[in-house]
Image (cartoon, grey):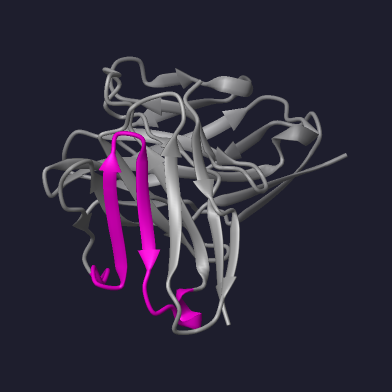
């Protein structure tokens, strides 16, 4: 089946530094990827839609200058949390759509990245 | 705006007992509904989906869900649960926003199976 990986799985950083999280589709091409944020014991909240070769589309209330998204290839999207602060600590999850699948509704999810900002 | 409500944050059940996880949605247009499962330290996996057609949808691992338009519900059921079903379950609805289909998730229900 379709596999999506995320790296790193866990990261601890100091306040004020930037952190990059990678999302890769391992066995399929993904024109569209999604980035979610999940707080403890809460649901997934969509942050942005990442489109290969174009700018990401951010959801209302998400700071595009703080959460930089780059989707430079059909198998890789990156999320960079710039000048991270403790309130950015969260579980970040990506998902990807198989470009060649007719199942437009199917998203394959990565295992998530836990970010802790000290 | 479309939304999803999962009425139970936690559901404890004994092994081999039946279970129902409740999900209600709000929508005034065509509805596409999903149930995902999240095992500890893993990504979300699709259990089942309703796009159209039969209102009773069967998924993986013996789960099924019924789309009820009049009650705006999409409850998940399993007749006999196993210890391995212990996980977080999310109901979601697909909405069209800014020209793309996106998922809106419910709050999640933690299913705990006791021996």
Q: Residue at x 15, y 47 (%)?
A: A54
| Nearest to the observer: residue A42 or residue A10 | A10
Residue B55 vs residue A81, the one in the foreground: A81
Considering the image in quadrants, where does the C terminus of chain B appear?
top right
Instruction: Out of A8 and B15, give the one closest to the viewer.
Output: A8
Residue A90 falls left or right of residue A83:
right
Is residue B23 at all visible to an observer of this figure? no
Residue name at image x 52 percent, y 52 percent: B108
Residue at the right extreme? B115
Location of residue B68 in the rendering, given as x and y in whole percent from the top left corner: 36, 31
Q: Is residue A30 magenta?
A: no
Q: Quadrant of the N terminus of chain B?
A: bottom left
Q: Is residue B2 left or right of residue A113?
A: left
Residue B36, x across and y down, in percent: 50, 37
Q: Is residue A56 visible to the viewer in this orientation of the structure? A: yes
Magenta highlight on residue A64: yes
User: What range is drawn magenta here?
Assistant: A61-88
């Amino acid at each position: 089946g379709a596999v999506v990986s995320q790296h790193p799985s866990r990261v601890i950083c100091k306040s004020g530094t930037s952190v990059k999280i990678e999302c890769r589709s391992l066995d399929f091409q993904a024109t569209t990827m999604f980035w979610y944020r999940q707080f403890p014991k809460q649901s997934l909240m969509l942050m942005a839609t990442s489109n290969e070769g174009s700018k990401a589309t951010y959801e209302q209330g998400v700071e595009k200058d703080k959460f930089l998204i780059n989707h430079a290839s059909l198998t890789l999207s990156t999320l960079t949390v710039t000048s991270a602060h403790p309130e950015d600590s969260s579980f970040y999850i990506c998902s990807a759509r198989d470009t060649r699948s007719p199942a437009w509704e199917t998203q394959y999810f990565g295992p998530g990245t836990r970010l802790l900002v000290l | 705006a479309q939304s999803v409500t999962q009425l139970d944050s936690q559901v404890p059940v004994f092994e081999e007992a039946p279970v129902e996880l409740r999900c209600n949605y709000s929508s005034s247009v065509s509805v596409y509904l999903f149930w995902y499962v999240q095992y500890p330290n893993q990504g979300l996996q699709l259990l089942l989906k309703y796009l159209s057609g039969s209102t009773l949808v069967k998924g993986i691992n013996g789960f099924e869900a019924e789309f009820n338009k009049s009650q705006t519900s999409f409850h998940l059921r399993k007749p006999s649960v196993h210890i391995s079903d212990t996980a977080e379950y999310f109901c979601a609805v697909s909405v069209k926003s800014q020209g793309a289909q996106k998922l809106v998730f419910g709050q999640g229900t933690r299913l705990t199976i006791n021996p």
